Image (cartoon, rainbow, N blue to C red):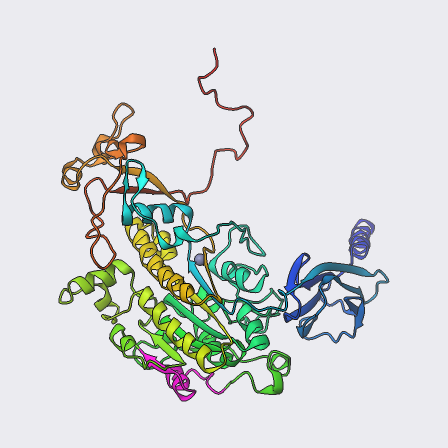
Amino acid sequence: MIKTSFGILAVALTGMAVAAPKIRVMPYDGARFLAGQMFDVRVEFTPSQPGRQIVEPMLMIAGKSVPVVLDAANGFTIRAYRLKDPSHYTIEATAKESGDNQTTRTSIGFRIEQAGGNKRRIKNIIICLGDGMGMAHRTAARIVRYGVKNGIPQGFLNMDRMPGYGAVSTHSLDSFVTDSAPGMTGYVSGNHNDNGSEGVYPDNTKDAFDNPRIEYLSQFLHRTYGTSLGIVTTADIEDATPASQMVHTYDRGKGTGICNQFFAERNRSGLKVLMGGGRKWFLPEGQFGSSRAAATNFAYATDLLSSGWNPGGNTIDTSAMSTSTSLIDSFKRVGFGYVDSATALKSVPADATKLLGLFAYGNMNVSMEKIAKRRNPTKPGAVDDYFAPDQPMLDEMAEAALKVLDNNNRTNGNRGFNLLIEGAHIDKQSHAMDADRAIWEVLEFDRAVGKAIEYAKTHDDTIVLVLADHECSGFSLVGALKKSMSEMQALPSDRDKLGPDTHPARQAAVGTYEGAGFPHYPILADGFPLTANIDRKLVVGFGAGADRYEDWLSNAIQVYDGSAPK
Ligand SMILES: [Zn+2]
């Protein structure tokens, strides 16, 4: 009996000694914002044991005490916070637990950066985002498109001709391996987000749409200067990169809610052009092809609706949130023209100022499939299987978007615009390790980059940025086949030849170093190769396997490389 009591007592004492609530503050330590950029501050207190109460929560922001009223999740959010003076600031939170006198303290530091000068030379920002596009993707596309002779590239991609070049890190807030959501968000909010989340910090509530927000570039510039926003992608429009222009959610998979937010918050970002796939999120629930569903929808948190994110209480339009609503009709009702095919896109009125284009139910088809249909319209193909036989190419969408945004500039006193042009399938086809299709996607993307550069050449208040959010699958150029396609087809399977002394024929046919030579792809007038299956075709490898050895320990000494006398 004594022994048992002693044991319980010891546990209790230990428990008391470590009793301290955990405190999480967002923004994170090291965050940066533009002067005047809005962001939400959230503080969360987690008791050391269930049943314990948080007492005396206190919060200091930028040296000022803020009264804290804890919500049901033991947290507290300040919406739409902003500071106008560039400097370093701190947020400090403290709390105690019931039955304990110990105070726990957490503090983070953040910076407010000067937002440009007084002169606004650049009014139009065009971001061309090659999703998952690494250096090797570009090199492969250049070789396929232009070829090489005497070691000299016989032409350069549009993006090769950019006047400046740099590299940035796009790690997410919770991993060094980012995904498209925090990748894009990083560029257009200046903040790191958790993987899978767009324009928000993590929080401890289940609702993916109530998270602390960070104001996007499009929202900041629209609020400050009245700029327009255009979003153009070959993906489903709810996908991470397009959504990360103006949608705030912790869950990139919530398509109904994401597309509802495009509509509801169009006037916070100046949304004027929305083009891509994803019609399924816009069709009323129950209609053919519709994916609108309560499970991927949301309702606005009340504190958000009464905050600076919804100035005057009427900027966020919640009239089209129901899954039985046609979002296409809703966009039409507020003046958007709607097109659903390449043919319809050609007949958009020359003076259009608002345009919704949904060219597929989900992701649009990849360029190889779209081109195959254009070259041979009567031959059934993947575009027919996808119920979208007449889809535009990305450069055609980019050109139409630029026209509509330019019309806005002409009718609103040249307030400027932000335009995203995303080549989405560079990433998706690299995920699928379909090298030929990934390369063709870079070609399609680069043609759209060309449209952006063309626009900038005649509008000197325009900047074009060609970006990638991350690389995908460790795409790398291995070499080229040493044989013709028919010779390759005639080779025996490597499966029959595996043995330590034989070099399997199909492996031996991969030429590296001088064995690779210069593959030559004939290019047709549409800008794409006649075929991906040329003789001596380019060979691509994928490095997306984990670095792995038996015991995970680094070698104690380097492997002998034969260069020193033994
Ligand atoms: Zn991506």
Residue 536 placed where, x, y %? 22, 39
Q: Residue at x 35, y 72 (%)?
A: 400
- Residue farthest to the top? 566
- Residue farthest to the right? 101
Q: Residue at x 40, y 82 (%)?
A: 327
- Residue 517 in sight here: yes
- Choose between 123 and 95: the one closer to the eye: 123
In the rendered view, would you say 285 is above or below 202?
Answer: below
Residue 36 placed where, x, y %? 66, 71
Q: Is residue 275 magenta?
A: no
- Residue 249 in sight here: no
373 on left or right of 119: left
Q: Residue at x 84, y 63 (%)?
A: 100
Q: Is residue 338 magenta?
A: yes
Span colored in magenta: 319-339
Q: Quadrant of ligand 1?
A: bottom left
